[in-house]
Amino acid sequence: AKVRFDLVQLQAAIEGDVVMTNELQQAMIDIYEAQLPNFWVWTIGGDEFSWISTSIAKWFESLSARVAQFTPWLTTARPNSFWLSGFKNPNAFLTAMKQEVTRQHKSDGWALDDVVYHTEVADFDNGTMVRAPPKEGVYVHGLFLEGAAWEGKGNNGSLVESEPKKLYSPLPVLYITAVTKKMKADARGTFGAYGPHECPLYKYSSRTDRYLITVASLSTRE
């Protein structure tokens, strides 16, 4: 709604129907240079209003992908696999998933304070291959590894060195669910002789605490 309003106002300002403010003038310059107007991304207080993109074309491409994910979810059913970075607040999404799984195990005496995330690399290379959701937890896709690669199928695969001159490599679909702390400790042996590599998962390529979502346990067999 804000973007539509700003574009209508900008068109009216160009036609002389409203005053061309400094904000509208800067937006006109940014759009002409294929850049993203700052106030489409950040609020006056510096909070993230939408999402960070390298260009206005990438921003609209991301907008279309978000519409494609959320519209069927609203009109039909939840997706089989979720594009995690497509959420404005992916941390809240995973928290809701953890609460849902905990409720499913209420009869087992699970308490939210004793439940943590558990991750496994699924057998699907990308989200389009997922034909049904898991019984509990979620599948997420669209993730990339920086400075490493994934080799093999599912949780039988492992982290390996990336190819020369290739900084980013796609990660297959990741299964994220909730387990008790004891169950997570008991599962360490399934991640290889060296145990899992606790890989931080970020919303953007900028690796700061501000964009940290969670930590994914990935197998290391070498």
Image: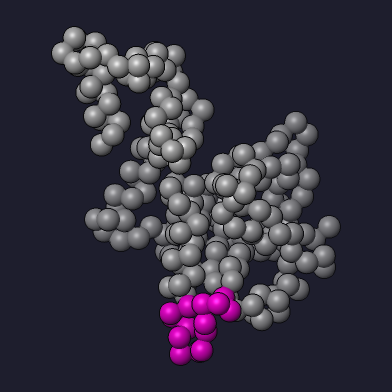
**Does 217 sit left or right of 123 as displayed?**
right
Q: As rendered, which of 66 and 30 lies closer to the eye?
A: 30
Residue at the spot 57% in from the left edge and 47% down from the top edge: 210
Residue farthest toward the left in the current orientation of the protein: 17
**Does 42 sit left or right of 68 as displayed?**
right
Q: Is residue 204 above or below residue 199?
A: above
**Does 54 sit left or right of 79 as displayed?**
right
How many labels were placed on the picture?
0
Q: Is residue 35 above or below residue 3?
A: above
**Residue 114 placement: quadrant:** bottom right
**Quadrant holding the C terminus:** bottom right
- Return the x and y of residue 13 as percentages of the image width and height: 23, 14
Q: Is residue 144 above or below residue 97?
A: above
Q: As rendered, which of 103 and 23 lies closer to the eye?
A: 23
Q: As rendered, which of 59 and 23 lies closer to the eye?
A: 23
Residue at the spot 55% in from the left edge and 64% down from the top edge: 176
Q: Is residue 110 visible?
A: yes
Residue farthest toward the front in the current orientation of the protein: 45
Residue at the spot 30% in from the left edge and 31% down from the top edge: 3
Q: As rendered, which of 55 and 6 lies closer to the eye?
A: 6
Q: Main secondary structure of the magenta part?
A: helix
- Return the x and y of residue 41 as percentages of the image width and height: 43, 34
- Return the x and y of residue 55 as percentages of the image width and height: 47, 25
Q: Is residue 130 visible?
A: no
* Residue interval drawn in magenta: 102-115
**Quadrant holding the N terminus:** top left
- Return the x and y of residue 173 as percentages of the image width and height: 55, 55
**Residue 213 placement: quadrant:** bottom right
